[in-house]
Amino acid sequence: MFSHIMVGANNVEESKKFYDAALGALGVEPGVMDPKGRCFYRTPTGVFAITPPINTEPATHGNGSTIGFAAKDPAAADAWHAAGIANGGTMCEDPPGVRDGGATKLYLAYLKDPSGNKICALHRMG
């Protein structure tokens, strides 16, 4: 359904360090910078990017927004969370763990990136 997701960052290099570590824990290659100062993470299933805002105003996070990254298992979600914390991310929500969504159980790990964007690693449990 989605081709890409792009979030604003006030310090792209700081955010790249964070996302290289956190997404690297999920098996994603380090981001690639372009001449416009944007950073792109490309996978067979889509693109995630960080960018300084084009209007030159400060980047802000979306209140109520969450971007979820697929994790192959709970251990990958935990590694993603630990890598994010070690590289400038901050805890938010409950600690990583199983959440009962009624019809399905999910393993979720939430963080805020260095610019305050709320992100999550998610594994759908069998």
Image (cartoon, rainbow, N blue to C red):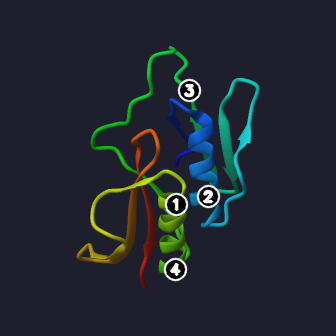
Label 3, residues with CA under 10 Å away: few <14, some 14-19, many ≥20: some
Q: In this view, does 8 lie to the left or right of 109?
A: right
- Which residue bears the numbered disc 4? 75
Q: Upstream in the sequence, badge 3 or badge 2?
A: 2
Which of label 4 and label 1 is nearer to you?
1
- Seen at 58% across and 41% down, the residue is 14
Q: In this view, does 85 lie to the left or right of 11?
A: left
- Which residue bears the numbered disc 1? 86
Q: Where is residue 116 in the image (x, y as percent from the top left)?
A: 39, 41
Label 1, residues with CA under 10 Å away: few <14, some 14-19, many ≥20: few
- The single residue placed furthest to the bottom in the displayed view is 126
- Which residue bears the numbered disc 2? 21
Q: Label 4 vs label 2: CA separation?
A: 15 Å
Are dots 2 and 1 in contact, CB under 8 Å? yes
- Which residue bears the numbered disc 3? 52
Mark 1 secondary-structure assignment: helix
| Rendering quarter of residue 59 | top left
Label 2, residues with CA under 10 Å away: few <14, some 14-19, many ≥20: many
Looking at the rendering, in which quadrant would you find the C terminus? bottom left
Q: Disc 4 residue type?
A: Ala
